[in-house]
Image (cartoon, helix red, strand yellow):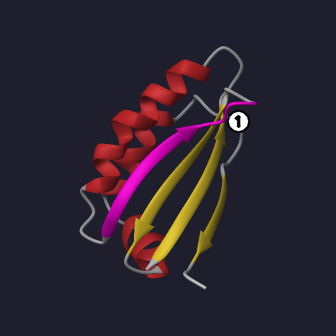
Amino acid sequence: MVTEIAIFTALAGKEDELGQAILRGLEVIRRHPECISSRVERCIEKPGQYMLINIRTSLDAHTKDFRCGPLFPQWRSHINGLFEANPTVFHYQPF
């Protein structure tokens, strides 16, 4: 099991729009068969920053199966043009 953490920072004036778009996009992420769970949280101190938390069966389930499959462009279509640069993404495993 692997937890993917992705930090998105909204473009100025797009803070709420990005949050709603991520919420809509969760349904696409959850359709992937190796997705265990997916949720988003908004930063209290920086309301334009969102943390996407996806739990998947393995690292390859994200980096190869999801990112290289047909669901990834569908997911990104919800959020394109609403955030700064590329999100910061890290993967964690139980310790």
Residue 27 shows in the view? yes
Residue 24 versus residue 53 in the image, above or below: above
- State which quadrant residue 16 falls in: top right
Q: Residue at x 53, y 28 (%)?
A: 18
Which quarter of the figure is the N terminus placed in? Answer: bottom left
Could you say where residue 29 lies in the image, as x and y percent from the top left? Answer: 34, 53
- Looking at the image, which is closer to me, 85 or 26? 26
Q: Main secondary structure of the magenta part?
A: strand
Please give left or right for residue 53 compared with residue 69 in the image: right
Which quarter of the figure is the C terminus placed in? Answer: bottom right
Residue 67 shows in the view? no
Q: Is residue 36 magenta?
A: yes
- State which quadrant residue 15 falls in: top right
Q: Residue furthest top?
A: 13
Instruction: Tell me which segment is drawn in magenta.
Output: 35-45
Q: Residue at x 40, y 76 (%)?
A: 61
Residue 63 versus residue 87 in the image, above or below: below
Please give left or right for residue 24 compared with residue 31 in the image: right
Q: Which residue is mark 1?
A: 84
Could you say where residue 43 lies in the image, as x and y percent from the top left? Answer: 66, 35
Q: Residue at x 63, y 33 (%)?
A: 83
Q: Residue at x 50, y 29 (%)?
A: 19
User: Mark 1 is on which residue type?
Assistant: Glu
Please give left or right for residue 83 compared with residue 25 in the image: right
Please give left or right for residue 73 compared with residue 81 in the image: left
Could you say where residue 33 lies in the image, as x and y percent from the top left? Answer: 24, 68
